[in-house]
Image: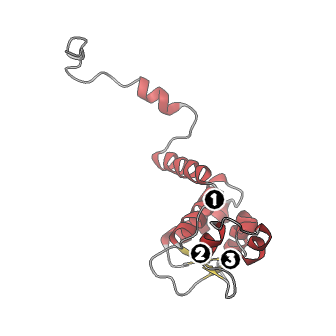
């Protein structure tokens, strides 16, 4: 009951990518996982069907796995994400974290990502936030302002 609002926020962020977000009692070490419905394709079957040369794209829509995201309420990541979401559910960091959790759970469950570049740029943004700077050009300025290395003069840097 305490995570009902969190599940709704995550479902709103994930929209059509996920059918359901719920709290799981079977997870121990991971923050979340992807499970498929009883009659949908598994990750391996979905990958095989997407690789078929003469595939019928109309069947991919309804036979593709209906993914359910299960959350571990005892995991520190989920607890902290809930605190952030309770403060401001429209925060860009919350949306990025929810998408990262979903996409890494997809990968861990054997599914493939639709857009790898968006996933990697999202990871880069999270690393930047973790290091304490935003992507506003400050990284390039900081590199230019570094002092020269000791013993690094014009003579020693020439190639022989």
- Between discs 2 and 3, the one toward the N terminus: 2
The reply to whether callout 2 and callout 1 are in contact (CB within 8 Å) is no
Q: Quadrant of residue 55?
A: bottom right
Whole-Å distance between the Cαs marked 2 and 3?
A: 7 Å
Q: Where residue 158 appears, x then y in whole percent?
A: 24, 14
Quadrant assignment for the N terminus: bottom right
Q: Where residue 26 appears, x then y in whole percent?
A: 52, 87
Which residue is nearer to you in this view: 69 or 9? 69
Q: Which residue is mark 2?
A: 43
Whole-Å distance between the Cαs marked 2 and 1?
A: 27 Å
- Which numbered marker is on residue 104? none
Which residue is nearer to you in this view: 40 or 131? 40
Name the residue located 60 percent from the left edge and 72 percent from the top edge.
Answer: 48
- Which numbered marker is on residue 94? 1
The reply to whether callout 2 and callout 3 are in contact (CB within 8 Å) is yes
- Between discs 2 and 1, the one toward the N terminus: 2
Secondary structure under tag 3 reads loop
The structure's colour scheme is secondary structure
Mark nearest the camera among 3 and 1 is 3
Mark nearest the camera among 2 and 1 is 2
As drawn, which residue projects farthest toward the top?
A: 155
Q: Where residue 72 appears, x then y in whole percent?
A: 54, 78
How dense is the environment of label 2, judged by Cα within 10 Å: few (below 14), some, or many (20 and up)? many
Whole-Å distance between the Cαs marked 3 and 1?
A: 26 Å
Residue 92, compared with residue 155, is above or below; it is: below
Q: Which residue is mark 3?
A: 65
How dense is the environment of label 3, judged by Cα within 10 Å: few (below 14), some, or many (20 and up)? many
């Amino acid at each position: 009951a305490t995570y009902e609002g969190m599940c709704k926020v995550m479902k709103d962020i994930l929209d059509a990518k996920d059918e359901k977000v719920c709290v799981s009692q079977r997870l121990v070490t991971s923050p979340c996982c992807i499970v498929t419905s009883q009659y949908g394709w598994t990750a391996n079957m979905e990958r095989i069907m997407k690789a078929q040369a003469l595939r019928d794209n109309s069947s991919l829509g309804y036979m593709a796995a209906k993914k359910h995201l299960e959350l571990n309420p005892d995991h520190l990541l989920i607890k902290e994400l809930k605190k952030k979401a309770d403060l401001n559910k429209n925060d860009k960091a919350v949306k990025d974290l929810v998408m990262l959790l979903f996409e890494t759970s997809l990968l861990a469950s054997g599914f493939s990502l639709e857009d790898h570049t968006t996933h990697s740029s999202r990871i880069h943004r999270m690393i930047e936030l973790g290091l304490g700077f935003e992507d506003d050009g400050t990284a390039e300025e900081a590199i230019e302002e570094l002092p020269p290395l000791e013993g690094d003069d014009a003579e020693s840097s020439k190639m022989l």
